[in-house]
Image (cartoon, rainbow, N blue to C red):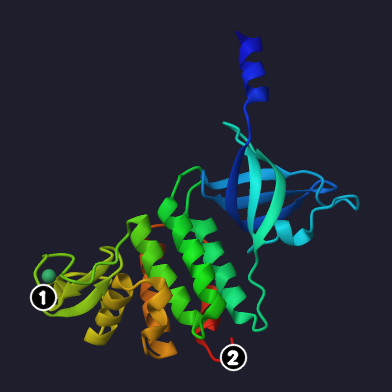
Amino acid sequence: MFFQWGFLLLTMPPIKTDAFVLDKINFRETSVILTLFTREFGKIKGVLKGVRSQKSKIPPLTFSEGSYIYLFVYKRKTGLNLFTSPTLIDFLNFEKKSEFRVFLWILKLIDLFVPENQIEEKIFSLIFGSKEVLKYTKKPYLVFLGFKIKFIETLGYGIKTDICSKCNSNKKIYFFNPKMGGVICGECGKREFDCIKISGKINSIIRFIKRIDLKDIEILKIKKSECEKINFLCNLVLYYHTSFDLIWWENEKYIFRKDY
Ligand SMILES: [Zn+2]
């Protein structure tokens, strides 16, 4: 019986999938450990052997953070998976580097907040869509914000904007509550701690971004400072749902400042 199972494992065929490289760590003399977001399996980690040796014919770009690749995955139940034969499909290489940096930030959020081995077709589409829009956009900060709002929704953390998240009434909205993942009315706001005052305009912008497709997000005409404010609210929601000690959002402010 044991022999048969071992035989099965050895002969299980690899699965070809497309994937985004979220993270790369050099491993031993010539290998790398990659964290990928794949279409087939969601987020997975694995070893890609021998690609850093001088004899390797695989270009380093193929296993660099931010690359979009094809590869074969030998899936394992425990421990690291085995990756082989990667080929590069697409890589964002801009003259202006800000779009690429925004894309790396997006991938970093995926790596931080998405658990391994959870198939998430919606998240894959969101990364893919962000990459395509970043190719032509003049407003990468807006793409980042759009991504983040849609990402939070996909994770199931909010963000509610139409009615009060506490009493479900459609009374006028005055506050935002990260714990409830949405806006709340003036009356509920009086009884709730941890509320942040928001304007009707900020609420409308969030609502608009939720409804619009990422590829059309450029039509939104708002200031970078307003984007930064909404990004802050988004971070509070993500912060509430995680127990990370690290300050993962620290450098995000540069996305919304001049000359980034
Ligand atoms: Zn209320």
Which kind of residue does numbered mark 2 sit on?
A: Asp
Residue 243 in view of the camera: no
For the residue labelled by badge 2, is the local secondary structure a helix, a strand or a loop? loop
| Whole-percent x, y for residue 89 in the image | 65, 59
Which residue is label 2 attached to? 259
Q: Which is closer to the viewer, label 1 or label 2?
A: 2
Task: Looking at this view, name the residue that lies furthest to the right.
Answer: 54
Mark 1: few/some/many CA within 10 Å (<14, 14-19, 20+): some
Q: Is residue 201 left or right of residue 131?
A: left
Q: Closer to the N terminus: mark 1 or mark 2? A: 1
Q: CA distance from mark 1 to mark 2?
A: 41 Å
Which residue is label 1 attached to? 187
Q: Nearer the viewer, residue 170 or 166?
A: 170
| Whole-percent x, y for residue 239 in the image | 41, 64
| Whole-percent x, y for residue 58 in the image | 79, 53
> Residue 156 occupies which quadrant of the picture?
bottom left
Image-quarter location of ligand 1: bottom left
Residue at image coords 62%, 45%: 45
Residue 171 in view of the camera: yes
Compared with residue 100, is residue 51 higher up or lower down, i.e. above or below? Answer: above
Q: Is mark 1 within 8 Å of ligand 1?
A: yes
Q: What's the mark number on residue 60?
A: none
Residue at image coords 48%, 81%: 141
